[in-house]
Structure formats: structure tokens, C-alpha cells
Image (cartoon, rainbow, N blue to C red):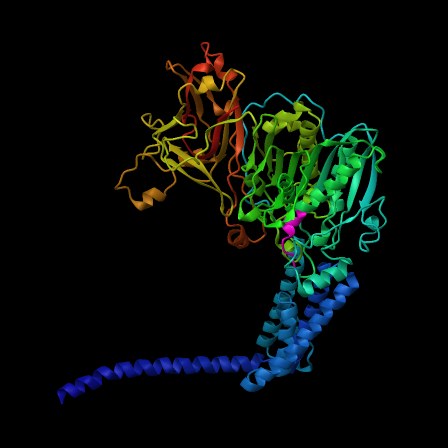
Amino acid sequence: MNSNSKTDQESKPKLSKYFRILNLWRTALAWVSRFWADIRPGVEFRRGACWGCVVAAFAGAILAGWHMNTGFGLWVDLLFVLVVGALVILLSLAVVPLLLTIFRKLPRLATGLIIGCGVISPVLFIPAGLLGATIAIIQAPGFNRAKAKKKIITIGLLILSLAALIGQVVFPAYEGSLEGQTEAVLTSPPPNPLNAPNPSEPGDYGVRVIYYGTEGGNPRRPEYNNPTISTPTADASRFFKDFKGWRRKLREKYWGYGMDELPLNATVWLPDGPGPFPLALIVHGNHGMAEFSDPGYQYLGELLASRGFILASVDENFINSGLFHDPPKQQAVRGWLLLEHLKLWHGWSQDENNPFGVEIDFEQIALMGHSRGGEAAATAALFNKLSHYPDDAKIRFDYNFPIRSVVAIAPADGQYKPAGQWRVIEDVNYFTIQGANDADVFFFAGSYQWDRVRFTGSDWFKSELYIYRANHGQFNTVWGRRDFSYPLGWLLNVKPLLDPEDQRLIAKIYITAFLEATLQDRREYIPLFRDYRTIKDWLPETFYVNRYEDGEYKLVAGFDEDPNLITCSLPGGKIESTDLSIWREGRIPFRRGNREHNGVFLGWNRLNEEGEEDPEIRPAYSITLPDNAATDWNLTAESVLTFSIAALDEEAPLLKEKEEKKESEKNQKDEAAEEEKAEAPDFTVELELYDGTVAARPLSDFGNILPPLEVRFTKLAFLDSEFYQKDSEPVFQTISIPLSAFSGENGFDMGHLNAIRLQFNLTRAGVILLSEIGIE
């Protein structure tokens, strides 16, 4: 009896607590019910929401049609989008009411209409529908008698939806911000200025423009439909054997021809003179096929022709994206078509009465390309020396033209791999130029190809130029500031970009100088490819990174030979280090992925646990050369030591760190170390002879290692981290040190050079990545 009473007494408080919670829940539900009854909209809410969504859908369809640009004409595009939109809404009106009839949850026709409009204009329909609904409520007869809370909420939602719509109009017009821009102070003394005329200045020749193309075969390109010179077509059907179905038929309907009769079209800028003149072909990359890309290099054509070059801008728009697809295998065909154009030029060059009226120097040829066209130029250089198409031996090649130079402007790489292998090209001069703010080809793909350019003689060179605040599209006047078409283009952060004319000025200087140096033997222009600072006064103000190598280059260490950290590329060479907190070899990263090529990562930190410099920490990295290497190479004071080097956005750990140090202390950033992290890495370069004699110079006497060039591609930070992943990537700067800088010290004899040593004694901490160390 007592036990039961005790149990009853214990259960009463629990039941009491339960009933209190239940009462509170009932009270809350009752309050919500009364509140909803006070503000509940009538049928006008539904009608207004429908009208708002219909307006949003119509606006979205108009925007989509305006930017679709299929090439069939604006009215056709608008009509197409409106018809598709109407069909979507009708389908939604049929399907959604049926589903709601089954589930009996929401008003059927209104819900179907709203969902259909949402499919057409997913961004606009919510605020537009809400705006329409609130306006309808306010205009309803009984709104003046509604309770204050309903009025407040309705007006608040109207303001909120109106603000959202205004924001969606303002956001695309907003260019972005300069947040996160890299800043650096360059302290290295500049080299001697270039002793040559500015190559971006017009030359002495007048300029003529003519067109060649397939007469009558280009209804969409009137300039090629009635060309100055008529050309045959090229049969690419063997490359497109798998291109079938409605996509092929629709493309043939649009262009008026199929892959078996592709036109050979080009705009040609000619010097007004007798010649002979070197020949350069340039080809655009992938863009909407209805917005023709080949006129976008007029600025280069006029300049080069005035300076004694023939430039032909090749039309390949017919294999660009459009009509809801990309033609398959078009990456390889882009390069093949360049060679088909060269076949025409070869015939004209053999004709004393050629239709151009000038003598063509067919021994001096350059191929140039932009984006996929940049990859196509390298592909053409490869195909030029092959007897068969690597992916199908039934397609025979017979070209072997004297192509001396390739220019790749923000090129793609790896979209076409011949026989599944990376493309290696030999014995051509190669120049690639890339913008750091390129939102399309967002890693330095041209540098990847640069690694795969090989020389078997000493007459060749390769160079690359990386430009901070340059994008992808401004190298072509048709493409512009936004590297994506709309609506994605509205998301891009274009505020930091260079002025379009400034970006094209850089291209004019470097491309013209490259052609002058390689096709007209103007070797006085070589220094600007080694170091942009020789022409700093000609260039727009931004950061530049140069990389250079020529046929006389001797590789000392390339870090790909084996996984052994103490061996180098020279058999018998030996690598040693002391007091480095980071020493590893591994893949060189891009912004996403890697080069499939190794470098060495070196980090040093001369601070102790208390944040003070420790004189006992002496970080160094040294390479001992094989016996007689200096003699075999005939090293003299005229030889040049080169480093291909990049700074990393990484902090070197302390070399001597107490094991018992707390995690919180590890995460604290020492003020001195933080200042050091912002400082450009610098170190002493030491050369040691066999007898132990040492000569030393700071690296910064010859060039600066730029910090990682950070880029914000979009207006929304989460999009950058999701798509681009990293805000910077290692870009290699070639720093060249003439051995004469050391030879003056105590009669230093380079023929007895034994070791190259990097002493990290000038900055307290840093992390660098070396791709190569070599000697010219």
C-alpha cells in the first residue's frame, strides 16, 4: 500500500508537467490560427501571384531569346523561346492540376501556372509572383478594412519583393569589387632598357584588306560569299563519321553545307609593297557560332601588315558551339583546317602572278590561335610533321610546311590528345600569353604545352607571359569583358580587369616582337621575352611574369628523373640540403589539377619558438655538378644561370618546434613571422669552385619572385571556391643570372664550377617552388 502511494505521488508531477506543455502548445496553435485569420489573403492573392509570375516568365523568355543568338535572327530566337515557354506553361497547367486533384492540397490552375512560369524564369518568378500578389491584395476592396497586422505584413512583403527585383536588375550591372587584389613592392633593380623600336607602333607599309573563300557557299557570311579570291572546300567528313542525326542536319540547314564541304575562308591584311613578306595565320577559339569571331583580330592584322607581315584571320565559326551542341572531334579539325589553308598559300607562293599581288615568303610561317585556336595552332604544328592522323590511319597527311613559330593566346590544352597522348611539338619557336583573370581557361594551360615543346637545335626559343588583371575575351574585340555568355556572365567580377585597349596593347607588343624575332631575325627583341622590365615603360601598369628557354639551355635539375631527392637531372650530380623545414618533390599544381610534371618544394623558417631569429638555423639547398660538367659545357662569363621559380601561398613551419607546445600556441601567428610572410622571398645564390672558392649574389639583384597573384573571378565568393577552388596558382618566373656577375670576384673561373647553392639567409621565412634550374 505504501509503495503504490509513493508511485502515485511521483507520477503526479510528471503528468502535471505534460499537461502544462500540452496547454502551451494548444495556446500557441490558437494564437497562430487567429493571427492567420487576421492576415489571410483572399483569392486576389492567387490572381496577383499568377500575373506576377506571367510577367516574370515573359521577361525571362525575352532575355533568353535576346541572348540566345542562334544565328537564325532575333525574331526567330524570340519566337522560339516564347513558343517553348508557352508549351511549358500549358504542360504545367495540365500536369500540376492533375496531381493536385489527386492530392487535393493547393489551387490547381494557379499552382500549375506558377510552376510553369517558375520553370521558364526560375530567378524572377518568386519575387515577381510575390510582388503581383501583394499588389493584388492592396488593390482588393476590403484591404482598407483589414487589421493593421495584415497591412503591415502585406506592405512589408511588397517592399521586400520589390527590393529583390531591383537587386536582380542591379546585380548584373554591378561590375564587382577589387577585394583580394595582390599588392607587392618590387625592389629588384631594373635591367637595361630594350634597344629596339616599340613593336606596337605602326610600320611604314600601307595596309590592304582582301577576302578569300568559297564563292556562293557562305550565305551567312557575305564577305566570303563574294570573295576577292575563290577557294575550294575541304572535306572533313572522315573526321566526323560519328556526327549524325538531327544535330548534323540542323547544322547543315543553318550553314547550307555539311562537313564534307567546309569552306576555306579568311580575311587577309597585306602590306602594300612588293615583298617578300612572312606569313602568319591566326584562328579564333570556341564562341557562339552565330557571333563571328574571326573579325576580332583586326587590330593585329592592321599592325602586322603595316610592319611587313601577311596576316590571315581564318574563319572556323562553322565548327563552333551552337544549335544546342558541339560538333564532336572538332578540336582536331581546327588544327587540320589551318594546314589546309597553308596548302592554299603554298600554291599561291609558287605562282609569280598570285592573286595577292605581293611576294609571299613561304619559308617564314607562323601559326597563331586564341583559346581552342591556340591549341589548334600547336596541333597543326604536330600534324604538319606526321604522315597520318594519329586517331585514324586512313586519313593521310602530306604537309611538311616550314612552320617556324607558334603563338598561343590563352590556349586550351588537352581537349584533343593525339592517340590519347599529350601533344609534344619539336623545333618551333613557341610563345604563349595568358591572363591571370581568365575565367574561361582559368589555369595556365599554355604553360602546360610550353613544357612539351622540345628543341633539337640551338636556333629556337620558347617564352610565356602571364598578365595580372587580363581576362580571356579582351584579346578578341568581338568577345569582350565577360568570359561567359549570359546569364553566367552576370556573375563574373570584371571590376579588376585591365582596360580592353591596354590588354590588346600588351598582345600587340609581344606578338609583333615575337614574329619580328623569329620570322625576320630581329634578335634585338629577345630580351623582352626574358624580362618584361626591359620594356616596362611601354606596358600598362600591372604584374607580369616571364618564362624563357632557348635551344642552348642545359638542364641541371628538373626533378622528374626519379623519386630520389638527392639526385638531379645530370648523371653524377648530387643534391644536399640543411635546415629546410620543407623539402619535397612532387607534382606542380595548377588552380585545379596539376602539370603531370614535378618540381621541388623548398621552405625555410629561421625563427625559433620565441619568434626570434636563430643564428644556428642556416637553411640551404645545393647542387654539386658532375665532374667536368663545366668544362664539357664550355662555361664562361657569358653563360647564364637560370631559375624557373614561383612563390607559394604557404607558411613554412618552424624547424625546431617543442613537442609539448600546445595546439593553441601553434595556431598563434607571431607578428614578425606574419610580416615576413608578406615579404617577397629572397635568397643568396652561391657558386663554388673545386678549390672551395665561393662567389655570392642576392637573387633580388636580378629579379623579383612575385607573390601568388590572387584572383576573385565571380561576385560571389562561394562560387569561386566551388568552381575555381583556388584563388591563385604557381606561375613560373625565369630569373636569369649572367655568370659574369660572379666572375669579377677574385678571378672566378667558371670552367672550374663545382656547385650551385641557394642560401636562404635574406628573408626569415618562405616557401618556393622550383620547376627547373639550368644553364645557357
Q: What stretch is highlighted in magenta?
A: 325-334
Q: Nearer the viewer, residue 578 or 400?
A: 400
Q: Please indicate, yes or no, whether residue 610 appears anywhere in the rendered image.
A: yes
Quadrant holding the N terminus = bottom left
Is residue 115 or residue 443 the one in the foreground? 443
Q: Where is residue 676 in the image (x, y as percent from the top left)?
A: 44, 33
* Percent position of residue 541, x then y: 64, 34
Determine which quarter of the picture holds residue 112: bottom right
Q: Is residue 718 above or below residue 183?
A: below
Q: Inspect the magenta stretch and tell me whether residue 330 lies in it.
A: yes
Whether 592 is drawn above or below 690: the answer is: below
Given residues 82 and 448, the one toward you in this image is 448
- The residue at 29%/44% (across/down) is 662
Q: Residue 658: image x %, image y %?
A: 27, 38
**Lateral position of residue 168 relative to residue 663, left or right:** right
Quadrant hosting residue 528: top right
Q: Residue furthest bottom?
A: 1
Given the current orientation, which residue lies at the most extreme left position?
2
Where residue 50 appears, as percent x and y from the top left, is 67, 76
**228 in relation to 357, above or below:** below
| Nearer to us in this view, 317 or 84 | 317
Q: Can residue 531 be seen in this view?
A: no
Q: Residue at x 61, y 78 (%)?
A: 111
Q: How many labels does the image show?
A: 0
Left or right of 741? Residue 499 is: right
Extreme-front residue of the structure: 394
Q: Is residue 565 magenta?
A: no
